[in-house]
Amino acid sequence: MAHWDGYSGDVNNFFVYVDPEQGRELRFIPWDTDTAYEPDHPFLPDVDWPRSAYAWARLPRGLYALEETRERYRELLRQELSEHWDADALHEKIDLFADVAKDSAAAASVETLHAFIDERRAQLTLELDAPAKPWTLAERGVWKCRTDAFSSLVASFDTTWDLAATTALGNTLTATVQGAPLVPIYVIASAGVSLDPAAPGNALRLTVGNPDGSFTLFQFQLGVPSLG
């Protein structure tokens, strides 16, 4: 489903449950799966990573590096495509949701989803019919939140008032973090009302992609929430 913003693709949006009756069995519970059905990963560097798997986190990276578990995964993925990937049903579901939202932005998203559904099986089959592509990216780094991490920052950006909407084209940023200059590959800007109870209010976010595949997030709180 190309859900990049989960554990395997971004070390994010998951719980781990330990069933007291099952001993050592761990169960991953995903949440916030709004980035499913997206063909591109916004934070991965421009390298030839496999589109049939995400292995940025430690556990999937280790499993994908082992030939036995990698081939078992590819076998199960092919089985899923054969037995459960129903493009017609997915198209029908998308159209049902599209009837609820009639604005132009929703219409554009609907077309993107339809295109993804049409292309996904062929994309995965092409990879599964060939030798497995290696995962060459370094392990995703742990998030580190600091309030004094940079000594200087200069940025130029353009965005709209919607924290979910992001722009990257034409944005620039120069910053020094703990004495070391950042070398941005991209700068994503967004602004809007943050509903995060830990940091509520109007917020400005600047996400900087780093050459090693990690990213640095600068968030500025701009005061009380605005209804405008």
Image (tube, grey):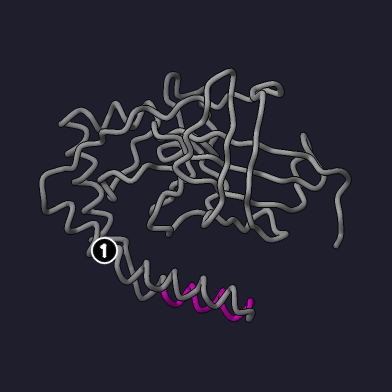
Residue 11 point in image, percent of width and height = 48, 34
Q: Give above or below for 195 relative to 97.
A: above
Relative depth, front residue between 199 and 161:
161
Residue 213 point in image, percent of width and height = 40, 35
Q: Any magenta on residue 76? A: no
Q: Amino acid at mark 1?
A: Arg
Q: Judging from the image, what secondary structure is the residue with disc 1 in?
A: helix
On the image, numbered disc 1 is attached to which residue?
121
Residue 30 point in image, percent of width and height = 51, 42
Left or right: residue 23 versus residue 206 is left
Q: Residue at x 73, y 59 (%)?
A: 161
Could you tell me how many numbered marks the image carries?
A: 1
Left or right: residue 22 versus residue 156 is left
Relative depth, front residue between 193 and 118:
193
Relative depth, front residue between 8 and 21:
8
In magenta, the rendered stretch is 91-101
Q: For residue 57, which quarter of the picture?
A: top left
